[in-house]
Image: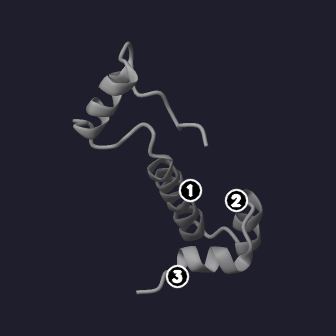
Amino acid sequence: MAPAAKCPLLDDTTEEEGREICLNCPRPECAYDVAAHRRQDLKARNEEIYKLAAAGFTTKTICKRFNLKRQALYAILHPNP
């Protein structure tokens, strides 16, 4: 799988230098961490879903807008404790 983004810290470095920089990376989040980017996207989507539900939009409307099944929407709006 291709990286989510190009890391600016690795510009003009050799492969060996790049590994050393990655192992001691000062950044809080890696540009190559696809899972972290996916989590951020899902969090933003879910926040939008919460807002629409609070505004009174129907389940059908929200599901259609985000291409979700009713069960998935229910899981988002009513997470297990």
Residue located at (53% from left, 57% from top): 42
Q: Using the image, tell me which numbered label, if any, was put on residue 66.
A: 2
Three-letter amino acid code at the position of disc 2: Phe
Three-letter amino acid code at the position of disc 1: Arg
Kind of element beneath mark 1: helix
Residue located at (48% from left, 47% from top): 37
Question: Could you tell me if the residues under marks 2 and 1 are in contact, i.e. CB atoms within 8 Å?
Answer: yes
Kind of element beneath mark 3: loop
Instruction: In the rendered view, tell whether residue 44 sits above or below residue 59.
Output: above
Image quadrant containing the N terminus: top right
Neighbor class of circle 2 (other Cα within 10 Å; few <14, some 14-19, many 20+) is few
Residue located at (42% from left, 37% from top): 31
Neighbor class of circle 1 (other Cα within 10 Å; few <14, some 14-19, many 20+) is few
Instruction: In the rendered view, tell whether residue 32 sits above or below residue 7.
Output: below
Instruction: In the rendered view, tell whether residue 15 sits above or below residue 1.
Output: above
Q: Using the image, tell me which numbered label, if any, was put on residue 45.
A: 1
